Image: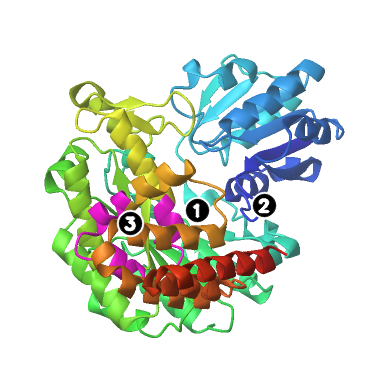
Amino acid sequence: MIILTTLNAKYIHASLGLRYLYANLEELQSDAKICEYTINSRPIDIAEKLLEQQPTIIGFGVYIWNCQETLSVISQIKAISPETKIILGGPEISYETEQQKLAEIADFVITGAADKSFYQLCKDILAGQLPENKILRSKPVELAELKLPYDLYSDEDLKQRVMYIEASRGCPFKCEFCLSALDKNAYPFELERFLTAMDKLFQRGARHFKFVDRTFNLKITTTLEIIDFFLDRMCEGLFLHFEVIPDHLPEKLKDKLRLFPEGSLQFEVGIQTFNKEVQAHISRRQKNQKSKDNLVWLRDNTNAHIHADLIFGLPGESLESFAQSFDELYVCRPHEIQMGILKRLRGSPLIRHTEKFDLRFSPEPPYNILSNNTVDFFTMQRVNRFARYWDMIGNSGRFSFSLPLLLADSPFDNFLKLTDWLFEQTGQTHKINLKRLYELIAQACEKLIPENHQNLVIQMEKDYDRSKLKGAYQLLAVSTKQKQQPPNRAMHSARQQRHVKSLTNN
Protein backbone atom coordinates (compact mmCIF):
# COMPACT_ATOMS: atom_id res chain seq x y z
CA MET A 1 0.00 0.00 0.00
CA ILE A 2 1.23 3.47 -0.97
CA ILE A 3 -0.39 6.42 0.78
CA LEU A 4 -0.13 9.96 -0.57
CA THR A 5 -0.87 12.51 2.10
CA THR A 6 -0.51 16.11 3.19
CA LEU A 7 -1.82 18.41 5.89
CA ASN A 8 -3.86 21.14 4.24
CA ALA A 9 -4.37 24.51 5.88
CA LYS A 10 -8.15 23.99 5.73
CA TYR A 11 -10.50 21.25 4.58
CA ILE A 12 -11.69 23.31 1.60
CA HIS A 13 -8.18 23.17 0.07
CA ALA A 14 -7.91 20.01 -2.02
CA SER A 15 -4.30 19.12 -2.82
CA LEU A 16 -3.54 19.39 -6.53
CA GLY A 17 0.00 18.06 -5.99
CA LEU A 18 -1.14 14.75 -4.47
CA ARG A 19 -3.52 14.20 -7.34
CA TYR A 20 -0.73 14.74 -9.88
CA LEU A 21 1.39 12.12 -8.10
CA TYR A 22 -1.47 9.64 -7.96
CA ALA A 23 -2.45 10.22 -11.61
CA ASN A 24 1.10 9.36 -12.71
CA LEU A 25 1.68 6.22 -10.63
CA GLU A 26 1.10 3.96 -13.63
CA GLU A 27 0.62 0.30 -12.60
CA LEU A 28 1.15 1.17 -8.91
CA GLN A 29 -2.00 3.28 -8.82
CA SER A 30 -4.24 0.31 -8.00
CA ASP A 31 -2.39 -0.13 -4.69
CA ALA A 32 -2.25 3.56 -3.82
CA LYS A 33 -4.54 5.95 -1.97
CA ILE A 34 -4.83 9.69 -1.26
CA CYS A 35 -5.48 10.65 2.38
CA GLU A 36 -5.77 14.36 3.21
CA TYR A 37 -5.83 15.94 6.66
CA THR A 38 -5.62 19.46 8.06
CA ILE A 39 -3.06 21.13 10.31
CA ASN A 40 -5.77 21.42 12.98
CA SER A 41 -5.93 17.64 13.48
CA ARG A 42 -3.85 16.07 16.27
CA PRO A 43 -0.63 14.58 14.86
CA ILE A 44 -1.08 11.37 16.85
CA ASP A 45 -4.57 10.93 15.40
CA ILE A 46 -3.21 11.37 11.88
CA ALA A 47 -0.45 8.86 12.56
CA GLU A 48 -3.04 6.36 13.82
CA LYS A 49 -5.24 6.76 10.73
CA LEU A 50 -2.29 6.31 8.41
CA LEU A 51 -0.77 3.30 10.16
CA GLU A 52 -4.03 1.39 10.55
CA GLN A 53 -3.94 0.97 6.76
CA GLN A 54 -0.56 -0.79 7.05
CA PRO A 55 1.20 1.16 4.29
CA THR A 56 4.59 0.19 2.94
CA ILE A 57 5.24 3.74 1.73
CA ILE A 58 3.83 7.10 2.84
CA GLY A 59 4.55 10.16 0.72
CA PHE A 60 4.12 13.55 2.42
CA GLY A 61 3.68 16.90 0.66
CA VAL A 62 5.59 19.47 2.72
CA TYR A 63 4.80 23.18 2.60
CA ILE A 64 5.63 26.23 4.67
CA TRP A 65 2.27 26.06 6.45
CA ASN A 66 2.47 22.39 7.49
CA CYS A 67 6.15 21.53 8.00
CA GLN A 68 6.07 21.60 11.81
CA GLU A 69 2.90 19.52 12.03
CA THR A 70 4.25 17.10 9.42
CA LEU A 71 7.44 16.65 11.47
CA SER A 72 5.35 15.70 14.50
CA VAL A 73 3.29 13.17 12.51
CA ILE A 74 6.37 11.52 10.96
CA SER A 75 8.21 11.39 14.29
CA GLN A 76 5.36 9.39 15.79
CA ILE A 77 5.03 7.12 12.75
CA LYS A 78 8.75 6.30 12.90
CA ALA A 79 8.56 5.62 16.64
CA ILE A 80 5.73 3.13 16.12
CA SER A 81 6.57 1.69 12.69
CA PRO A 82 10.21 2.36 11.73
CA GLU A 83 9.95 -0.02 8.77
CA THR A 84 7.38 2.20 7.02
CA LYS A 85 9.19 4.09 4.28
CA ILE A 86 8.64 7.86 4.43
CA ILE A 87 9.13 9.94 1.26
CA LEU A 88 9.00 13.72 1.40
CA GLY A 89 8.43 16.22 -1.41
CA GLY A 90 7.19 19.75 -1.90
CA PRO A 91 8.63 23.29 -1.98
CA GLU A 92 9.53 23.51 1.72
CA ILE A 93 11.75 20.42 1.64
CA SER A 94 13.19 20.95 -1.86
CA TYR A 95 15.72 23.59 -0.79
CA GLU A 96 18.31 23.63 2.01
CA THR A 97 17.23 20.03 2.43
CA GLU A 98 20.25 18.76 4.36
CA GLN A 99 19.72 21.32 7.14
CA GLN A 100 16.15 20.24 7.94
CA LYS A 101 15.14 17.86 10.70
CA LEU A 102 12.37 16.53 8.48
CA ALA A 103 14.99 15.25 6.06
CA GLU A 104 16.85 13.55 8.91
CA ILE A 105 13.94 11.37 9.97
CA ALA A 106 12.57 10.61 6.49
CA ASP A 107 13.84 7.74 4.39
CA PHE A 108 13.93 9.67 1.12
CA VAL A 109 13.41 13.24 -0.11
CA ILE A 110 12.50 14.14 -3.68
CA THR A 111 13.31 17.73 -4.62
CA GLY A 112 11.66 19.59 -7.48
CA ALA A 113 8.67 18.44 -9.55
CA ALA A 114 8.07 14.84 -8.41
CA ASP A 115 5.21 13.91 -10.78
CA LYS A 116 7.36 11.19 -12.42
CA SER A 117 10.22 10.65 -9.97
CA PHE A 118 7.87 9.66 -7.12
CA TYR A 119 6.57 6.79 -9.24
CA GLN A 120 10.10 5.59 -10.02
CA LEU A 121 11.19 5.75 -6.38
CA CYS A 122 8.15 3.78 -5.21
CA LYS A 123 8.80 1.21 -7.90
CA ASP A 124 12.42 0.81 -6.76
CA ILE A 125 11.47 0.51 -3.08
CA LEU A 126 8.83 -2.15 -3.76
CA ALA A 127 11.36 -4.07 -5.87
CA GLY A 128 13.88 -3.97 -3.02
CA GLN A 129 16.26 -1.77 -5.02
CA LEU A 130 16.79 1.11 -2.62
CA PRO A 131 18.63 4.14 -4.01
CA GLU A 132 22.05 4.85 -2.54
CA ASN A 133 21.25 8.52 -2.04
CA LYS A 134 18.65 9.73 0.40
CA ILE A 135 18.04 13.03 -1.41
CA LEU A 136 16.93 12.60 -5.02
CA ARG A 137 16.85 15.48 -7.51
CA SER A 138 13.95 15.35 -9.98
CA LYS A 139 14.65 15.81 -13.64
CA PRO A 140 12.65 18.47 -15.55
CA VAL A 141 9.16 17.25 -16.40
CA GLU A 142 7.72 17.43 -19.90
CA LEU A 143 4.12 18.60 -19.40
CA ALA A 144 2.95 16.66 -22.47
CA GLU A 145 4.00 13.43 -20.76
CA LEU A 146 1.98 14.06 -17.61
CA LYS A 147 -1.42 12.56 -17.00
CA LEU A 148 -3.77 15.29 -15.81
CA PRO A 149 -5.24 14.85 -12.32
CA TYR A 150 -8.64 16.51 -12.63
CA ASP A 151 -10.66 13.29 -12.85
CA LEU A 152 -9.39 12.54 -9.34
CA TYR A 153 -11.43 15.32 -7.79
CA SER A 154 -14.30 13.44 -6.17
CA ASP A 155 -17.96 14.45 -6.26
CA GLU A 156 -17.56 15.58 -2.65
CA ASP A 157 -14.58 17.71 -3.67
CA LEU A 158 -16.63 19.35 -6.41
CA LYS A 159 -19.41 20.21 -3.98
CA GLN A 160 -17.45 21.33 -0.95
CA ARG A 161 -13.89 22.25 -1.91
CA VAL A 162 -11.90 24.63 -4.08
CA MET A 163 -10.80 23.17 -7.42
CA TYR A 164 -7.17 24.13 -7.99
CA ILE A 165 -6.31 24.33 -11.68
CA GLU A 166 -3.15 25.07 -13.67
CA ALA A 167 -3.01 25.93 -17.35
CA SER A 168 0.75 26.48 -17.16
CA ARG A 169 3.74 26.06 -14.90
CA GLY A 170 6.61 28.40 -14.19
CA CYS A 171 7.10 32.15 -14.47
CA PRO A 172 9.29 34.31 -16.72
CA PHE A 173 9.80 36.98 -14.05
CA LYS A 174 12.59 37.01 -11.47
CA CYS A 175 11.07 38.61 -8.36
CA GLU A 176 13.53 37.48 -5.71
CA PHE A 177 11.09 36.98 -2.83
CA CYS A 178 9.36 34.23 -4.83
CA LEU A 179 10.43 30.66 -5.63
CA SER A 180 9.17 31.20 -9.18
CA ALA A 181 12.27 33.37 -9.67
CA LEU A 182 14.12 30.07 -10.15
CA ASP A 183 12.05 29.19 -13.22
CA LYS A 184 13.47 29.91 -16.65
CA ASN A 185 10.09 30.54 -18.27
CA ALA A 186 6.39 29.74 -18.16
CA TYR A 187 5.34 26.48 -19.83
CA PRO A 188 1.73 25.92 -20.92
CA PHE A 189 -0.15 22.65 -21.00
CA GLU A 190 -1.47 21.69 -24.43
CA LEU A 191 -4.59 23.85 -24.62
CA GLU A 192 -7.06 21.45 -26.21
CA ARG A 193 -6.22 18.70 -23.73
CA PHE A 194 -6.48 21.16 -20.85
CA LEU A 195 -9.87 22.54 -21.94
CA THR A 196 -11.21 19.01 -22.45
CA ALA A 197 -10.33 18.29 -18.81
CA MET A 198 -12.02 21.53 -17.73
CA ASP A 199 -15.16 20.62 -19.67
CA LYS A 200 -15.33 17.26 -17.88
CA LEU A 201 -15.05 19.03 -14.54
CA PHE A 202 -17.74 21.50 -15.51
CA GLN A 203 -20.10 18.77 -16.73
CA ARG A 204 -19.62 16.99 -13.40
CA GLY A 205 -20.77 20.12 -11.56
CA ALA A 206 -17.58 22.02 -10.77
CA ARG A 207 -18.30 25.73 -10.49
CA HIS A 208 -15.38 27.15 -8.50
CA PHE A 209 -12.11 27.15 -10.48
CA LYS A 210 -9.02 28.61 -8.83
CA PHE A 211 -6.14 28.91 -11.31
CA VAL A 212 -2.70 28.68 -9.68
CA ASP A 213 -0.82 29.97 -12.75
CA ARG A 214 1.59 32.71 -11.68
CA THR A 215 0.95 34.77 -14.83
CA PHE A 216 -2.44 33.87 -16.28
CA ASN A 217 -2.48 36.80 -18.74
CA LEU A 218 1.10 36.32 -19.97
CA LYS A 219 0.16 34.94 -23.41
CA ILE A 220 -3.01 36.76 -24.39
CA THR A 221 -4.09 34.40 -27.18
CA THR A 222 -4.20 31.51 -24.70
CA THR A 223 -5.84 33.69 -22.06
CA LEU A 224 -8.61 34.67 -24.46
CA GLU A 225 -9.33 31.05 -25.40
CA ILE A 226 -9.69 30.06 -21.75
CA ILE A 227 -11.83 33.12 -21.06
CA ASP A 228 -14.08 32.29 -24.04
CA PHE A 229 -14.37 28.68 -22.84
CA PHE A 230 -15.87 29.85 -19.54
CA LEU A 231 -17.95 32.66 -21.04
CA ASP A 232 -19.63 30.05 -23.25
CA ARG A 233 -20.52 28.11 -20.08
CA MET A 234 -21.43 31.06 -17.90
CA CYS A 235 -24.11 30.09 -15.42
CA GLU A 236 -25.23 30.81 -11.89
CA GLY A 237 -22.53 29.91 -9.37
CA LEU A 238 -19.60 29.86 -11.79
CA PHE A 239 -16.60 31.55 -10.17
CA LEU A 240 -13.09 31.97 -11.59
CA HIS A 241 -9.95 33.11 -9.77
CA PHE A 242 -6.88 34.21 -11.73
CA GLU A 243 -3.52 35.69 -10.76
CA VAL A 244 -2.70 38.37 -13.31
CA ILE A 245 0.17 40.63 -14.32
CA PRO A 246 -0.99 44.15 -13.39
CA ASP A 247 0.52 46.09 -16.30
CA HIS A 248 -0.65 43.77 -19.11
CA LEU A 249 -4.31 44.23 -20.04
CA PRO A 250 -4.56 44.70 -23.83
CA GLU A 251 -7.84 45.88 -25.35
CA LYS A 252 -8.85 42.42 -26.61
CA LEU A 253 -8.74 41.11 -23.05
CA LYS A 254 -10.56 44.15 -21.68
CA ASP A 255 -13.40 43.57 -24.13
CA LYS A 256 -13.87 40.04 -22.78
CA LEU A 257 -13.63 41.02 -19.12
CA ARG A 258 -16.55 43.43 -19.52
CA LEU A 259 -18.80 40.43 -20.26
CA PHE A 260 -18.45 38.66 -16.91
CA PRO A 261 -21.42 39.15 -14.56
CA GLU A 262 -21.09 40.19 -10.95
CA GLY A 263 -19.73 37.54 -8.62
CA SER A 264 -18.13 35.40 -11.33
CA LEU A 265 -14.56 36.74 -11.52
CA GLN A 266 -11.75 37.46 -9.07
CA PHE A 267 -8.29 38.78 -9.90
CA GLU A 268 -5.31 38.48 -7.61
CA VAL A 269 -2.98 41.30 -8.60
CA GLY A 270 0.57 41.34 -7.27
CA ILE A 271 1.75 44.92 -6.77
CA GLN A 272 4.12 44.31 -3.81
CA THR A 273 5.59 47.85 -3.96
CA PHE A 274 5.50 50.96 -6.12
CA ASN A 275 8.98 51.98 -4.93
CA LYS A 276 11.24 51.81 -8.01
CA GLU A 277 14.43 51.47 -5.95
CA VAL A 278 13.00 48.52 -4.02
CA GLN A 279 11.74 46.97 -7.27
CA ALA A 280 15.30 47.15 -8.60
CA HIS A 281 16.68 45.43 -5.47
CA ILE A 282 14.33 42.45 -5.93
CA SER A 283 14.60 42.30 -9.75
CA ARG A 284 10.93 43.13 -10.21
CA ARG A 285 9.86 44.54 -13.56
CA GLN A 286 6.64 46.54 -13.30
CA LYS A 287 5.22 49.57 -15.07
CA ASN A 288 3.78 51.35 -12.08
CA GLN A 289 1.55 53.89 -13.78
CA LYS A 290 0.20 51.30 -16.20
CA SER A 291 -0.56 49.00 -13.25
CA LYS A 292 -2.48 51.79 -11.49
CA ASP A 293 -4.39 52.67 -14.64
CA ASN A 294 -5.37 49.02 -15.14
CA LEU A 295 -6.58 48.66 -11.56
CA VAL A 296 -8.76 51.73 -11.92
CA TRP A 297 -10.05 50.49 -15.28
CA LEU A 298 -11.00 47.13 -13.79
CA ARG A 299 -12.95 48.81 -11.00
CA ASP A 300 -14.75 51.20 -13.34
CA ASN A 301 -15.49 48.87 -16.25
CA THR A 302 -15.84 45.29 -14.96
CA ASN A 303 -17.53 43.30 -12.22
CA ALA A 304 -14.28 41.61 -11.22
CA HIS A 305 -13.41 41.43 -7.54
CA ILE A 306 -9.87 42.80 -7.22
CA HIS A 307 -7.51 41.45 -4.56
CA ALA A 308 -4.24 43.43 -4.67
CA ASP A 309 -1.07 42.37 -2.82
CA LEU A 310 1.58 44.44 -1.06
CA ILE A 311 4.63 43.08 0.79
CA PHE A 312 6.14 44.86 3.79
CA GLY A 313 9.78 44.30 4.73
CA LEU A 314 11.39 44.18 1.28
CA PRO A 315 15.06 45.23 1.07
CA GLY A 316 15.37 49.01 1.07
CA GLU A 317 11.70 49.64 1.94
CA SER A 318 11.12 52.02 4.88
CA LEU A 319 7.87 52.54 6.76
CA GLU A 320 7.46 55.89 4.99
CA SER A 321 8.03 54.53 1.48
CA PHE A 322 5.69 51.60 2.13
CA ALA A 323 3.06 54.03 3.38
CA GLN A 324 3.32 55.84 0.04
CA SER A 325 2.80 52.57 -1.88
CA PHE A 326 -0.20 51.75 0.29
CA ASP A 327 -1.76 55.17 -0.28
CA GLU A 328 -1.18 54.96 -4.04
CA LEU A 329 -2.78 51.53 -4.16
CA TYR A 330 -5.72 52.57 -1.97
CA VAL A 331 -6.57 55.36 -4.44
CA CYS A 332 -6.95 52.65 -7.13
CA ARG A 333 -9.86 51.22 -5.09
CA PRO A 334 -9.19 47.46 -5.13
CA HIS A 335 -11.79 45.56 -3.15
CA GLU A 336 -9.06 44.11 -0.93
CA ILE A 337 -5.48 45.08 -0.16
CA GLN A 338 -3.64 42.02 1.11
CA MET A 339 -0.92 43.19 3.49
CA GLY A 340 1.73 40.50 3.27
CA ILE A 341 4.78 40.41 5.51
CA LEU A 342 8.00 39.33 3.76
CA LYS A 343 8.85 35.66 4.30
CA ARG A 344 12.11 33.85 3.76
CA LEU A 345 11.12 31.08 1.38
CA ARG A 346 13.81 28.39 1.25
CA GLY A 347 15.59 28.60 -2.08
CA SER A 348 14.43 32.09 -3.04
CA PRO A 349 17.20 34.44 -4.31
CA LEU A 350 16.20 37.06 -1.74
CA ILE A 351 18.72 35.59 0.69
CA ARG A 352 21.56 37.26 -1.24
CA HIS A 353 20.50 40.57 0.37
CA THR A 354 20.80 39.30 3.94
CA GLU A 355 24.07 40.97 4.87
CA LYS A 356 23.68 44.24 2.96
CA PHE A 357 20.19 44.97 4.32
CA ASP A 358 20.61 43.13 7.66
CA LEU A 359 17.58 40.91 6.99
CA ARG A 360 16.53 39.01 10.11
CA PHE A 361 13.85 36.36 9.84
CA SER A 362 12.00 34.26 12.38
CA PRO A 363 13.55 30.78 12.66
CA GLU A 364 10.03 29.33 12.88
CA PRO A 365 7.63 28.87 9.95
CA PRO A 366 6.40 30.87 8.10
CA TYR A 367 9.78 32.64 8.55
CA ASN A 368 8.41 36.20 8.67
CA ILE A 369 10.94 39.01 8.61
CA LEU A 370 11.59 40.44 12.09
CA SER A 371 13.69 43.46 11.19
CA ASN A 372 16.07 44.93 8.62
CA ASN A 373 18.30 47.97 8.34
CA THR A 374 15.38 50.32 7.62
CA VAL A 375 12.65 48.82 9.85
CA ASP A 376 13.29 47.80 13.46
CA PHE A 377 11.56 44.92 15.23
CA PHE A 378 9.02 47.08 17.06
CA THR A 379 7.95 48.85 13.87
CA MET A 380 7.65 45.48 12.18
CA GLN A 381 5.33 44.36 14.97
CA ARG A 382 3.19 47.47 14.50
CA VAL A 383 2.80 46.70 10.80
CA ASN A 384 1.98 43.06 11.58
CA ARG A 385 -0.86 44.36 13.74
CA PHE A 386 -1.84 46.80 10.99
CA ALA A 387 -2.14 43.85 8.57
CA ARG A 388 -4.36 41.91 10.95
CA TYR A 389 -6.65 44.84 11.75
CA TRP A 390 -6.81 45.77 8.08
CA ASP A 391 -8.18 42.32 7.29
CA MET A 392 -10.78 42.72 10.03
CA ILE A 393 -11.78 46.26 9.07
CA GLY A 394 -10.50 47.35 5.65
CA ASN A 395 -10.92 44.07 3.76
CA SER A 396 -14.04 42.82 5.51
CA GLY A 397 -16.46 45.17 3.72
CA ARG A 398 -18.21 45.83 7.03
CA PHE A 399 -17.07 49.45 7.29
CA SER A 400 -17.64 50.72 3.76
CA PHE A 401 -19.47 53.86 4.94
CA SER A 402 -17.16 54.87 7.76
CA LEU A 403 -13.76 53.68 6.46
CA PRO A 404 -13.24 56.50 3.89
CA LEU A 405 -13.78 59.08 6.63
CA LEU A 406 -11.48 57.20 8.98
CA LEU A 407 -8.68 57.11 6.43
CA ALA A 408 -9.30 60.56 4.93
CA ASP A 409 -6.38 61.86 2.87
CA SER A 410 -3.67 59.81 4.67
CA PRO A 411 -4.92 56.20 4.55
CA PHE A 412 -1.83 54.42 5.87
CA ASP A 413 -0.92 56.91 8.60
CA ASN A 414 -4.49 57.22 9.86
CA PHE A 415 -5.04 53.47 9.93
CA LEU A 416 -1.73 52.99 11.73
CA LYS A 417 -2.97 55.39 14.41
CA LEU A 418 -6.16 53.34 14.67
CA THR A 419 -4.05 50.17 14.88
CA ASP A 420 -1.96 51.55 17.75
CA TRP A 421 -5.08 52.69 19.61
CA LEU A 422 -6.93 49.39 19.18
CA PHE A 423 -3.98 47.36 20.39
CA GLU A 424 -3.43 49.68 23.35
CA GLN A 425 -7.07 49.20 24.37
CA THR A 426 -7.36 45.46 23.79
CA GLY A 427 -3.92 43.84 23.56
CA GLN A 428 -5.54 41.62 20.92
CA THR A 429 -5.35 41.17 17.18
CA HIS A 430 -7.54 38.06 17.10
CA LYS A 431 -10.82 36.90 18.59
CA ILE A 432 -12.38 40.34 18.88
CA ASN A 433 -16.15 39.97 18.88
CA LEU A 434 -17.69 41.74 15.90
CA LYS A 435 -20.03 43.83 18.02
CA ARG A 436 -17.13 44.76 20.28
CA LEU A 437 -15.11 45.76 17.21
CA TYR A 438 -17.83 48.19 16.11
CA GLU A 439 -17.91 49.71 19.60
CA LEU A 440 -14.13 50.05 19.71
CA ILE A 441 -13.97 51.80 16.36
CA ALA A 442 -16.74 54.19 17.41
CA GLN A 443 -14.69 55.03 20.52
CA ALA A 444 -11.56 55.42 18.42
CA CYS A 445 -13.34 57.89 16.15
CA GLU A 446 -14.17 60.10 19.11
CA LYS A 447 -10.63 59.87 20.48
CA LEU A 448 -8.60 60.17 17.27
CA ILE A 449 -10.82 62.35 15.07
CA PRO A 450 -12.85 64.56 17.44
CA GLU A 451 -13.32 67.27 14.81
CA ASN A 452 -15.20 64.87 12.52
CA HIS A 453 -16.63 62.55 15.13
CA GLN A 454 -20.32 63.39 14.65
CA ASN A 455 -20.20 62.72 10.90
CA LEU A 456 -18.27 59.50 11.49
CA VAL A 457 -20.87 58.30 13.98
CA ILE A 458 -23.58 58.79 11.36
CA GLN A 459 -21.62 56.61 8.93
CA MET A 460 -20.93 54.07 11.67
CA GLU A 461 -24.68 53.81 12.26
CA LYS A 462 -25.10 52.85 8.61
CA ASP A 463 -22.39 50.19 8.92
CA TYR A 464 -23.99 48.92 12.14
CA ASP A 465 -27.39 48.75 10.54
CA ARG A 466 -26.07 46.79 7.56
CA SER A 467 -24.30 44.31 9.85
CA LYS A 468 -27.67 42.94 11.06
CA LEU A 469 -26.27 42.60 14.58
CA LYS A 470 -29.12 42.62 17.06
CA GLY A 471 -29.32 45.86 19.01
CA ALA A 472 -26.23 47.32 17.38
CA TYR A 473 -27.91 50.39 15.88
CA GLN A 474 -29.70 51.32 19.13
CA LEU A 475 -26.47 51.19 21.10
CA LEU A 476 -24.67 53.57 18.81
CA ALA A 477 -27.67 55.87 18.56
CA VAL A 478 -27.84 56.09 22.38
CA SER A 479 -24.13 56.89 22.48
CA THR A 480 -24.62 59.73 19.99
CA LYS A 481 -27.51 61.26 21.93
CA GLN A 482 -25.58 60.95 25.19
CA LYS A 483 -22.85 63.17 23.78
CA GLN A 484 -25.41 65.91 23.01
CA GLN A 485 -27.52 65.72 26.22
CA PRO A 486 -27.15 67.71 29.46
CA PRO A 487 -25.73 65.78 32.47
CA ASN A 488 -29.04 64.58 33.98
CA ARG A 489 -30.32 63.23 30.66
CA ALA A 490 -26.91 61.70 29.95
CA MET A 491 -27.17 59.70 33.19
CA HIS A 492 -30.59 58.42 32.11
CA SER A 493 -29.13 57.56 28.70
CA ALA A 494 -26.30 55.59 30.32
CA ARG A 495 -28.86 53.54 32.28
CA GLN A 496 -30.78 52.97 29.05
CA GLN A 497 -27.56 51.82 27.36
CA ARG A 498 -26.88 49.31 30.14
CA HIS A 499 -30.45 48.06 29.78
CA VAL A 500 -30.03 47.57 26.03
CA LYS A 501 -26.75 45.70 26.62
CA SER A 502 -28.50 43.46 29.12
CA LEU A 503 -31.28 42.66 26.65
CA THR A 504 -28.75 41.99 23.90
CA ASN A 505 -26.63 39.70 26.05
CA ASN A 506 -29.70 37.74 27.06
Decide which of tag 3 and tag 2 comes sooner along the chain. 2
Q: Residue 136 at x, y = what percent?
A: 53, 24
Q: Residue at x 53, y 83 (%)?
A: 234
Helix, strand or loop for disc 3: helix
Q: Are marks 1 and 2 in contact (CB under 8 Å)?
A: no
* Residue position for label 1: 144
Helix, strand or loop for disc 1: helix
Q: Which of the image's four quarters has the N terminus? A: top right
Amino acid type indicated by mark 2: Tyr
Q: Residue at x 38, y 77 (%)?
A: 458
Residue mark closest to the camera, 3 vs 1: 3
Figure colour scheme: rainbow
C-alpha separation, residue under disc 3 versus residue under disc 2: 42 Å
- Nearest the viewer among 361 and 85 is 361
Residue mark closest to the camera, 1 vs 2: 2
Decide which of tag 1 and tag 2 comes sooner along the chain. 2
* Residue position for label 2: 11
- Whether residue 342 is visible: no
- Nearest the viewer among 495 and 2 is 495
C-alpha separation, residue under disc 3 versus residue under disc 1: 62 Å
Q: Residue furthest toward the left?
A: 277
Helix, strand or loop for disc 2: loop
Q: In the picture, residue 5 is in which quadrant? A: top right
Looking at the rendering, the stretch of residues picked out in magenta corresponds to 389-417
Q: Residue furthest toward the front?
A: 488
| Residue 447's disc number | 3
